[in-house]
Amino acid sequence: MKQAIWSAAMLSIVSASVVFAQAETPRIDQRQANQERRIDQGIASGQLNEREAARLSNQQEHINNLEDKAKSDGVVTKKERARIRHAQDRTSRHIARQKHDRQQR
């Protein structure tokens, strides 16, 4: 009986530490999805040509890499969040500019 209680206690401690070790970034993930959707809409509507879309997709990939690096130690600090947010702001401006320039496919 003691063994079962001890095993259950250890399992709950280990599972709780795993949950806390994972850094959650729902706002960053949602914004990334929105920006990727904007790029896809620009491609579909013809507002973005292939070269522009590729460049914007590379910027999105860079942001994903920043996020992965920030999550690697299990905690995303305020400084890391600010850096990611700044990169997202910059990419968002680039998406808007490229979608509204006069270039077509």
Image (spheres, rainbow, N blue to C red):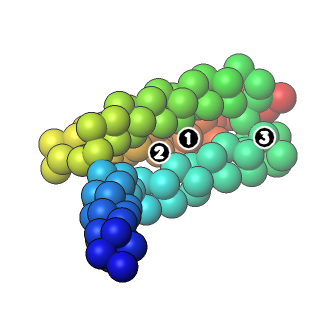
Secondary structure found at label 2 = helix
Question: In the rendered structure, are the residues bearing label 2 and label 1 in contact, judged by CB atoms less than 8 Å apart?
Answer: yes
Question: What amino acid does circle 2 point to?
Answer: Ser
Question: What amino acid does circle 1 point to?
Answer: Ile
Asked whether residue 34 appears in the rendered view, the answer is: yes
What distance separates the C-alpha of mark 2 from that of mark 1? Answer: 5 Å
Which residue position is annotated with label 1?
Answer: 95
Which residue position is annotated with label 2?
Answer: 92
State which tag comes first along the sequence, 3 or 1. 3
Which residue position is annotated with label 3?
Answer: 43
User: Is residue 7 positioned above or below 69 on the image?
Assistant: below
Question: In the rendered structure, are the residues bearing label 2 and label 3 in contact, judged by CB atoms less than 8 Å apart?
Answer: no
What distance separates the C-alpha of mark 2 from that of mark 3? Answer: 15 Å
Image x and y of residue 69, in percent:
35, 31
Q: Residues within 10 Å of mark 3 (few under 14, many from 20)?
A: some
The residue under the point 58% across, 54% down is: 33
Badge number at residue 30: none
User: Is residue 24 positioned above or below 75 on the image?
Assistant: below
Asked whether residue 12 appears in the rendered view, the answer is: no
Of the 4 image quadrants, the one containing the C terminus is top right
Q: Quadrant of residue 102?
A: top right
Q: Quadrant of residue 12?
A: bottom left
State which tag comes first along the sequence, 2 or 3. 3
Left-right relation of 30 to 47: left
Q: Observer-nearest residue: 18 or 104?
A: 18
